[in-house]
Amino acid sequence: MADSLEPEIARVFASVWATEVGGDVPELKPDTVLLESGLDSLGFAIFVSELENELGFDPFTLSTDAYYPQTYAEFVGFYEKYRPAA
């Protein structure tokens, strides 16, 4: 299996945070509730868009089920589940 996407996801989150919020980037722990991370809905839309640009895929369009990850670990896991085969 390929390396975890978590470092790349965290890097993109930090970049979006710097642009949209500014200041110190919050630590993203596995149990961090996404709605409590400090990004608003526009910030999350930008985050997902930037991840698609960086990773080359969007699991939300690849998935046939409506799924809304609640925690950072669920979010990373969702991206890893739908990562295209190398």
Image (cartoon, rainbow, N blue to C red):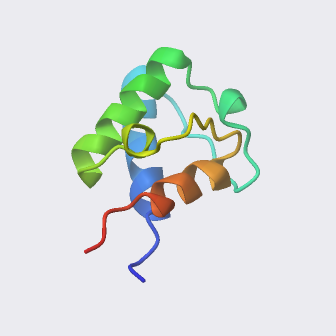
Residue at image coords 37%, 26%: 46
Q: Residue 55: image x %, image y %?
A: 28, 53
Q: Residue 10: image x %, image y %?
A: 47, 52
Q: Residue furthest bottom?
A: 1
Image-quadrant location for residue 24 = top right
Pick the front one: 65 or 80: 65
Q: In this view, does 16 lie to the left or right of 85?
A: right
Residue at image coords 70%, 45%: 71
Q: In this view, does 40 lie to the left or right of 49?
A: right
Q: Residue 35: image x %, image y %?
A: 68, 28
Q: Can you see residue 28?
A: no
Residue at image coords 42%, 24%: 45
Where does the C terminus fall, quadrant-wise? Answer: bottom left
Q: In this view, does 43 lie to the left or right of 74?
A: left
Q: Residue 21: image x %, image y %?
A: 48, 22
Q: In this view, does 48 lie above or below 62?
A: above
Q: Can you see residue 32?
A: yes
Q: Is residue 49 left or right of residue 69?
A: left
Image-quadrant location for residue 62 = top left
Where does the N terminus fall, quadrant-wise? Answer: bottom left
Q: In this view, does 62 lie above or below 35?
A: below
